[in-house]
Amino acid sequence: MSGDACGAALQLDEILLLPTPPAWVEAAVERWPELLLDHASCEKKAASTALALMFTYPEDRPLGAALAKLAREELRHFEQVQSLMQALGVPFRRQTPSRYATGLRALLRTADPGRKLDLLLAAALIEARSCERFRLLGPRLPGALGALYAQLERSEARHFERYIHFARLAGQEQWRARLQVLAAREAELATSADSQLRFHSGVPL
């Protein structure tokens, strides 16, 4: 979805208030097995987010149809990452919740009106950050891994545009102001010092 009835699609720099620091990119390139492990978890979480929204707002049929397709795409991405992990000898292990997701979720309203808009905007921000980082990492990573990330960059661009489209419909006049609030927190979490290296972490200590 490159545009919609509510206006032209936003660009990455209109959603992400700060770019990913070069230090995060360097750490991710050096420690790519850790990154790939977290990436697999991210794809499962992205599918789960889409399905949860479908169950929470079943009356919104256009949203449900769009998210059904998105969830299938995310699960296909998980399968691709899982296959690559096996080929590259990267084992699975259980992971703890990340600071990024916990910090962003803490700002979300828990009741409607407002909850739906916040959930859509948070999903858009996560997908936009994924898109940016795939773009940064694709040329830096070798072989099949770099090729996969170049492919996924395009998918994540479609996904954040789709979430923004539905946020505009849900938020009418308030979506842009609310996006700025959530984007400010997202930018802080994605660029400040972090104890972990994750796909959406800040700069690892």
Image (spheres, helix red, strand yellow):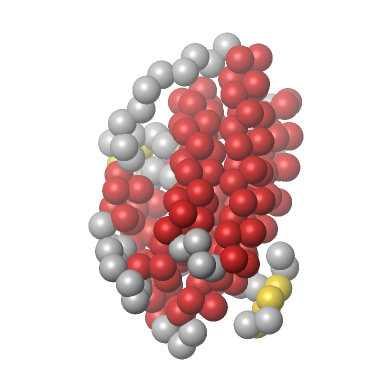
Residue lying farthest to the bottom in this orientation: 173
Quadrant of the image containing the C terminus: top left
Pinpoint residue 20: horizontal percent, then vertical percent: 48, 52
In the image, residue 25 above or below residue 156:
above
Residue lying farthest to the top in this orientation: 89
Left or right, 185 with reference to 172? left
In the image, residue 117 above or below residue 174:
above
Quadrant of the image containing the N terminus: bottom right
* Residue 57 in view of the camera: yes
Residue at figure coordinates x 28%, y 68% from the top left: 111
Looking at the rendered structure, the number of numbered marks drawn on it comes to 0
Left or right, 111 with reference to 60? left
Pinpoint residue 11: horizontal percent, then vertical percent: 62, 69
In the image, residue 88 above or below residue 191:
above
Residue at figure coordinates x 52%, y 31% from the top left: 40
Left or right, 92 with reference to 111? right
